[in-house]
Amino acid sequence: MNCNYCHQTINRNLTLKEIFLPQKILSEQLCSRCMKTFQLLEKKDSCQGCQRQSTQTAYCKDCLRWQQIYPNYNFQHEALFSYNQAMQEWFELYKFKGDYRLRHSFVPYLQSYFKQKKTFLAIPMPISKERMEVRGFNQVEGLLDAAGIPYEPHLIRFTHGLSQVQKTRKERLSLKQPFKLTQEGQKAVLNRDIILVDDIYTTGRTTFHGAQVILANHPAKLYTFSLAR
């Protein structure tokens, strides 16, 4: 069995589940050396709105600003990992260079998180048609598919532009609404518990645009989630 990321051999004892269901092993593992480079986020002393680390107050400055813009939205964003140098390099390979095999890298962590959200309808953040033609896959859907997490692609991106990581902070914050719900999605979110799923949370602008569209169709609850922030 090889590491999903560095491809070095992983030597460890198999679990009973892996022995009797060997197809589950595949390449859904990171070696301990690679895993140590990724930093799991702590909830202690973090922002209650976006999980920014080491904040001195309940909400960081960004979230206080979002509260002014969306005063009726009791938002709660959760993420698993810090968007540190190691995570940036991983996303460079997975998202921008198209190594689709890497969608398996964080399967156990995603499965553990979404096990607590079984009653929620997961909606992945969409990409534009132009981006899909270039990349060949939606990176968020890839992560969910690899982890076996059901979702519905009810959100559509109808505009195309530079990737968020290629924009300055000012450009990200000034982004106009790029999303809409499908007609089926408008019915599906009504009175449902929804979790909007993205890959990376930076300023929150994309997340709040997606949330705004969903909130307009009256879900029972709306949480947001990203692999990294």
Image (cartoon, rainbow, N blue to C red):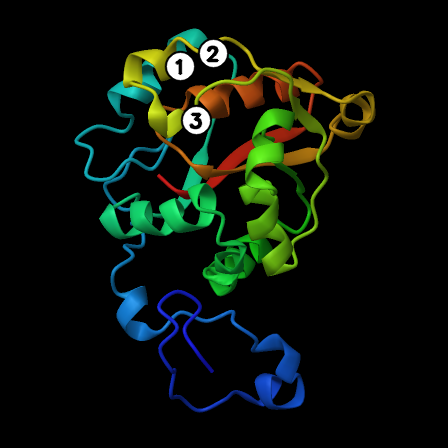
Q: Residue at x 56, y 30 (%)?
A: 131
Q: 186 left or right of 42? A: right
Report how far apart the C-alphas of labels 2 and 1 lie in the structure: 5 Å
The three-letter code of the residue at mark 3 reads Ser
The C terminus - image quarter: top left
Q: Earlier in the sequence, mark 3 or mark 1?
A: 1
Q: Secondary structure at mark 1?
A: helix
- Could you give the CA–CA distance between mark 2 and mark 3, rounded to whole angstroms? 24 Å
Of 35 and 27, which appears nearest the observer?
Answer: 27
Q: Which mark identifies residue 70?
A: 2
Around disc 2, counting alpha carbons within 10 Å, would you say few (fewer than 14), some (14 to 19), or many (20 or more)? Answer: some
Q: Which residue is mark 1?
A: 67
Identify which amino acid the numbered label 2 is placed on: Tyr
Classify 10 Å Cα crowding around label 3: few (below 14), some (14-19), many (20 and above).
few
Q: Amino acid at mark 1?
A: Gln
> In the image, is residue 151 above or below residue 158?
below
Distance from label 3 to label 1 (Cα)?
25 Å
Q: Pointer 2 and pointer 1: residues touching (CB < 8 Å)?
A: yes
Look at the numbered disc 2 and give the secondary structure of its residue: loop
Which quadrant would residue 96 be assigned to in this image?
A: top left
Instruction: Give the residue at x 82% y 20%.
Output: 183
Q: Which residue is mark 3?
A: 163
In the image, residue 35 above or below residue 8: above
Residue 125 appears in the picture as rendered: no
Q: Position of residue 61 (x, y in %)?
A: 25, 19
Q: Nearer the viewer, residue 94 or 191?
A: 94
**Closer to the eye: label 3 or 1:** 3
